[in-house]
Amino acid sequence: MAITINMTKAKELFKDKIRTIRKPLLEAEDVVYIKALETDDADAKSASVTKKQKLRDATDTSSIANATSEAELKSAWDTDLLGTNPYS
């Protein structure tokens, strides 16, 4: 009998890993945002807001939702946003 991957469960575990990785990234970005508030740096505030939204949206990408194999799911990791892919 062949071993099969439960993609529904795999996607949830993948999203949980993203949530774990993004928590400290969001916390660090909160510091950046507060510093931008203190210095009244509109560009830095805007960039921080954008980055935080991208982090929040990291679990809701079409590449995760549409993944039909383990390889596709692993490749859905956004290294630019989340850093090193723990699945590679």
Image: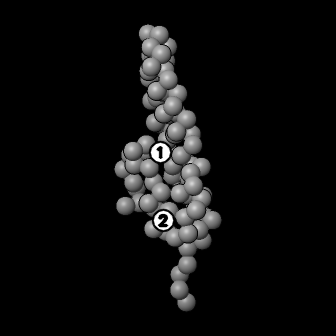
Q: Which of marks 1 and 2 is nearer the N terminus?
A: 1
Instruction: Tell me the element at label 2.
Output: helix
**Real-space CA distance between mark 1 and mark 2, rounded to the nearest whole angstrom:** 20 Å
Instruction: Tell me the element at label 1.
Output: helix
Q: Which mark is residue 72?
A: 2
Q: Is residue 31 above or below residue 71?
A: above
Image x and y of residue 5, in percent: 55, 73
Image x and y of residue 73, in percent: 50, 62
In-image side of 49 versus 39 (left or right): right
Query: Which residue type carries mark 1?
Result: Ile
In-image side of 60 versus 29 (left or right): right
- Mark 1 nearby-residue class (10 Å; few <14, some 14–19, many ≥20): some
Image x and y of residue 67, in percent: 55, 64
Q: In this view, does 70 lie above or below 44?
A: below
Which residue sits at x=55%, y=89%? 1
Q: Can residue 38 be seen in this view?
A: no
Q: Which mark is residue 3?
A: none
Q: Is residue 88 visible?
A: yes
- Mark 2 nearby-residue class (10 Å; few <14, some 14–19, many ≥20): few
Displayed quadrant of residue 28: top left
Which residue sits at x=53%, y=57%? 63
Q: Residue 21 carries which label?
A: 1
- The residue lying toward the viewer, choosing from 42 and 26, is 42
- The residue lying toward the viewer, choosing from 1 and 66, is 66
Query: Which residue type carries mark 2?
Result: Glu
Total marks shown come to 2
Which residue sits at x=48%, y=33%? 51
Query: Which residue is the extreme one toward the bottom?
Result: 1
